[in-house]
Image (spheres, rainbow, N blue to C red):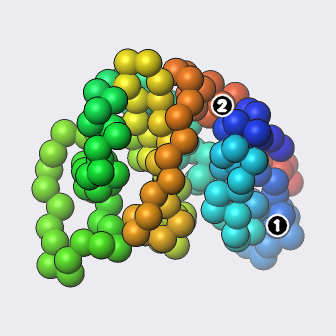
Amino acid sequence: MIFGDPYFFCISFDVAYPSENLTDSNIELGIFNFIIEDVFFPGKGGNWTLSMTISHLKEAVDEIESCPEIQESVINSPTFCENLSHSLQFLLETDPRDYELKDVEKLGVNLTPLEFGDCGYYIFYARSKKQEYIFYSYNAGLNFLKKELPLNCVKNVISSIEFNKTEH
């Protein structure tokens, strides 16, 4: 299923391993990707726990609605991705081994499904007064890509997701 516009921003997922095919399991495993400007993120893996991933995103909608507006000059600063990551309690590949995260005000919203973060795939949301942004990394924050989106795009895509576990 695809929710949103794949040439702009959307979420795509499909059940690959229904729970009735898994012994003693009530978990749907499948393929899950964000699609940002026609590029799949993370573009790997077919064993994501779909209910957990989708629940995480659905729970983020309230945070998106109350996300602080950040000045565009701050968002475009060279250290913003590092500050955003640390404010969301994510260590980066570039952090020293003994780096300790501080309790600071959140600059955005963590959209990273738990299993994605375990693999070094990060995706964060931030917004300014005029637009919103997705920052995503394939390598635990060594590099980030940024996508500018119109206000409410991300919230509308996440809110449109429907997922019903396979009935037994």
Residue 78 visible in image: yes
**Which circle marks residue 70 in the picture?**
none
| Residue ID for mark 2 | 157
In this rendering, position of residue 106 left or right of residue 151:
left
**Residue type at tag 1:** Tyr
Residue 38, horizontal then vertical, whole percent: 75, 48
Q: Quadrant of residue 4?
A: top right
Residue name at image x 62 percent, y 34 percent: 158
Among numbered discs 1 and 2, the one appearing first in the sequence:
1
In this rendering, position of residue 88 left or right of residue 152:
left
Residue name at image x 14 percent, y 67 percent: 100
Q: Which of the image's four quarters has the C terminus?
A: bottom right
Could you tell me which secondary element the residue under label 1 belongs to? strand
Q: Residues within 10 Å of mark 1 (few under 14, many from 20)?
A: some
Q: Residues within 10 Å of mark 2 (few under 14, many from 20)?
A: some
Residue name at image x 56 percent, y 30 percent: 149
Could you tell me how far apart the alpha carbons at marks 1 and 2 are, in whole angstroms? 24 Å
Could you tell me which secondary element the residue under label 2 belongs to? helix
Residue 11 visible in image: no
**Residue type at tag 2:** Val
Number of disc labels: 2
Residue 114, horizontal then vertical, whole percent: 49, 60
In this rendering, position of residue 48 left or right of residue 79:
right
Residue 90, horizontal then vertical, whole percent: 32, 60
| Residue ID for mark 1 | 17
Q: Quadrant of residue 1?
A: top right
Discs 1, 2 touching: Cβ within 8 Å: no
Of badges 1 and 2, the one in the foreground is 2
Camera-nearest residue between 11 and 6: 6
